[in-house]
């Protein structure tokens, strides 16, 4: 047996535990973070402190983070600049002509559709389903084809129905649109994959909701523009000014919270903005009624504010005589005053813009809270997405169209309507008889010469 080795002594670890083992990351970082303390010992027990070498780039100070005040100031400046840019662009397009407003509305609905679809998208699943996004855009294109076609055929019948190429598309427009939709529907059903059913049907329903809330309502805004620039500009300006008045009244004397979805909205601001919006509507309507460019339908898309439009104004814009009996002066004679009926209609427009249209914004706020996003997008610096600025405009434009068609519009026989009736309801021989009859009438009224009647007699086929 060998003797036990009693004199063998093991070297004790120091208090910092660095002898005989590699220092941990936390210990190393601790030593580096305290330059005044002794550095870690080396493996042989020496107490020499390690020298840290740092590159020049490391010695540079990191940029100081912005304070909340600086961030708010920067956001306010950006928001203000882009506000003036949008206002200038809006007025420039409005004075340039109806076609430019239609282009802006088209761009707005496309971008808004993209933003609304994006917040419900799941990239990881969409990556495995390559046709999901394509179907979204296909349904958008089909919907726009149908809605734009309806507007073009309705307002420009006198052009579309007399063109040999456009006539088949006009007469069968709705059937073509329906078949395009059915093709997309069949493709959607064929693209369903096991394990993704819930996601695919959610996207399908979400797409149709976006099409209704954005594109269908935008379609009525475009119709408002074609009916007269006033029916586009007045509702839009009422919503914008109401939002500004609500903000001013809210920060001035707002105390009572209006709705939990928007904590900054107050009852006082809501009511104060309603009153001020009505006053603004009266003043703005009085100005716009003086210009035929605003009150005439868009019978010429090439016109602008400087060339103007010509039409017989709707009676709603002409001053009429009204009699008023003061309730406190029953024995006095009734008083008579002249005012355009549009000044009464503006009460309804301003009230809707103040009391109902803001709920479009509340709806959008609830939608954003559902998906836990601050804004729909970043299309407008400082403002968020296009949808964040248009959430109240969609429902206001929809209301303006319905109110106009129900209480203000005049339904007269138009050239396009007569041509449509003749094409769809009369045979070719009957249409020729209509041409002969109209020609004889115009000759008798002295509107055209006798040579026109003789020319038609030689060109048109003889009666059977």
Image (tube, helix red, strand yellow):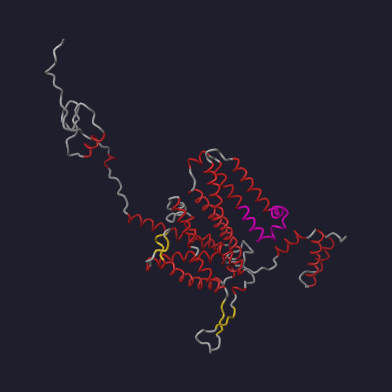
Residue 164 lies in the magenta-colored region? yes
Q: Nearer the viewer, residue 209 or 61?
A: 209
- Residue 45: image location, x then y, percent: 16, 27
**Residue 94 is drawn in which quadrant?**
bottom right
Residue 84 lies in the magenta-colored region? no
Residue at the extreme right of the image, as rendered = 464
56, above or below 240, in the image = above
**Residue 428 is drawn in which quadrant?**
bottom right
Say which residue appears at 29% left-offset and 45% top-offset: 62
In the image, taking residue 371 as reference, residue 207 lies left or right, namely right
- Residue 321: image location, x then y, percent: 59, 81
Q: Quadrant of the C terminus?
A: bottom right
Residue at the extreme top of the image, as rendered = 1
Q: Main secondary structure of the magenta part?
A: helix
Region rendered in magenta: 144-172
- Residue 14: image location, x then y, percent: 16, 30
**Residue 36 is drawn in which quadrant?**
top left
Say which residue appears at 58% left-offset and 77% top-offset: 319
36, above or below 271, in the image = above
Residue at the extreme bottom of the image, as rendered = 331
Say which residue appears at 60% left-offset and 52% top-offset: 143
Q: Nearer the viewer, residue 414 or 448?
A: 414
- Residue 429: image location, x then y, percent: 82, 60
Say which residue appears at 20% left-offset and 30% top-offset: 18
Q: Quadrant of the N terminus?
A: top left
Q: Nearer the viewer, residue 290 or 186?
A: 186
In the image, taking residue 447 as reference, residue 102 lies left or right, namely left
């Amino acid at each position: 047996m060998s003797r036990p080795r009693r004199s063998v002594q093991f070297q004790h670890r120091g208090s910092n535990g660095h002898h005989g083992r590699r220092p941990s990351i936390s210990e190393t970082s601790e030593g580096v973070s305290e330059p005044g303390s002794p550095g870690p010992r080396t493996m042989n027990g020496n107490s020499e402190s390690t020298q840290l070498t740092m590159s020049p780039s490391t010695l540079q100070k990191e940029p100081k983070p912005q304070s909340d005040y600086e961030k708010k100031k920067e956001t306010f400046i950006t928001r203000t600049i882009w506000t003036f840019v949008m206002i200038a662009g809006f007025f420039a397009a409005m004075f340039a002509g109806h076609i430019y407003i239609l282009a802006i509305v088209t761009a707005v609905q496309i971008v808004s559709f993209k933003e609304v679809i994006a917040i419900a998208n799941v990239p990881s699943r969409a990556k495995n389903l390559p046709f999901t996004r394509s179907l979204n855009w296909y349904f958008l294109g089909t919907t726009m084809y149908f809605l734009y076609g309806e507007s073009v055929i309705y307002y420009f019948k006198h052009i579309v129905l007399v063109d040999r190429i456009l006539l088949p598309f006009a007469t069968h427009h709705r059937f073509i649109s329906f078949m395009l939709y059915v093709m997309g529907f069949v493709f959607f059903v064929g693209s369903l994959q096991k394990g993704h059913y819930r996601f695919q049907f959610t996207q399908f329903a979400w797409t149709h909701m976006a099409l209704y809330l954005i594109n269908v309502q935008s379609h009525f805004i475009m119709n408002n523009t074609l009916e007269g620039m006033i029916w586009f500009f007045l509702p839009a300006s009422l919503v914008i000014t109401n939002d500004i008045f609500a903000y001013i009244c809210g920060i001035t004397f707002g105390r009572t919270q209006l709705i939990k979805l928007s904590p900054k909205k107050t009852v006082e601001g809501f009511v104060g903005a309603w009153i001020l919006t009505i006053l603004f509507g009266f003043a703005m309507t009085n100005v716009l009624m003086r210009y035929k460019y605003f009150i005439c339908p868009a019978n010429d898309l090439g016109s602008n504010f400087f060339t103007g439009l010509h039409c017989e104004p709707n009676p709603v814009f002409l001053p009429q005589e009204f009699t008023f009996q003061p309730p406190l002066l029953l024995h006095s004679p009734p008083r008579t005053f002249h005012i355009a009926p549009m000044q009464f209609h503006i009460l309804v427009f301003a009230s809707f813009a103040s009391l109902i249209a803001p709920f479009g914004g509340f709806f959008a706020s609830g939608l954003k809270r559902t998906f836990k996003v601050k804004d729909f997008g970043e299309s407008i610096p400082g403002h968020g997405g296009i949808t964040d600025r248009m959430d109240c405009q969609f429902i206001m434009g929809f209301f303006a169209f319905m109110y106009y068609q129900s209480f203000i519009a005049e339904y007269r026989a138009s050239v396009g309507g007569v041509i449509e009736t003749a094409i769809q309801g009369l045979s070719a021989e009957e249409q020729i008889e209509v041409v002969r009859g109209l020609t004889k009438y115009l000759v008798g009224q002295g509107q055209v010469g006798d040579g026109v009647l003789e020319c038609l007699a030689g060109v048109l086929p003889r009666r059977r």
